[in-house]
Amino acid sequence: PQDFALRLLVVPVAMMSVWFPRMAFEGPAAGLTYKKGLRWLAVGMFALLAILFLFVKRLLGVWLGMEFAASSYRLGQVLLLGLFFNALAHLPLAALHANKRVKETSLLHVGELLLYIPLLLVLYKQWGVEGVAWAWTIRAMFDCAGLFAMHRIWIKPKWT
């Protein structure tokens, strides 16, 4: 499930390769570009991931067999949830980098690592592989929230 889920990140990565130069050129005035990108990314990824979330057991069954699907579809659902937040985080990350805020995002990611490792160990010990998926999902949620907050603080987007 992880391999399949992470391959879906090609969507936000492709979108950001288009939006990044535009945000870099426009600088802090890229509010409308950012808002439009966020809308497209959120709606597109939500639709795709919601469909996959609902049918992950069936898809895994076709791909790897029903026995495997029965024991791992919840893992897939947890990863898809985390993937949604990970995908959304690509936009504020690109905007921050376009506005020369690389050091700040790097510090956020180092801080995440310091929290993620103990969380990973605790959840793995408690729930095994599904705990690992939850640790990654929680980290992705924290990353997403942190990047959006940093974007709001340092870029102060203009929405008009």
Image (spheres, helix red, strand yellow):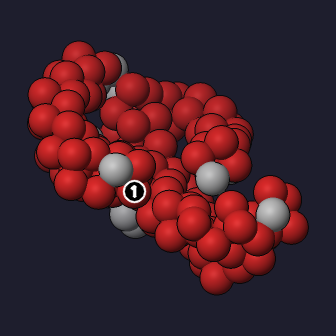
Of all residues, the one furthest to the right in this rendering is 62
Residue 61 left/right relative to 12: right
Q: Position of residue 21 (x, y in %)?
A: 59, 29
Task: List the single residue furthest toward the front.
Answer: 67
Near-viewer residue (5 or 25): 5
Residue 150 appears left or right of 79: left
For label 1, the residue is 130
> Dividing the image into 4 quarters, which one contains the C terminus?
bottom left
Residue 19, image quadrant: top right
Q: Is residue 120 visible?
A: yes
x, y percentage for residue 146? 21, 47
- Residue drawn at x 29%, y 57% is 127
Q: x and y percent of residue 159 in the render?
A: 37, 63
Residue 27 shown left or right of residue 17 in the figure: left
Q: In this view of the protein, can residue 22 be seen by the observer? A: no
The image shows residue 159, relative to residue 147, as above or below, that is below
How far across and how far down the image is residue 52, in percent?
Answer: 68, 72
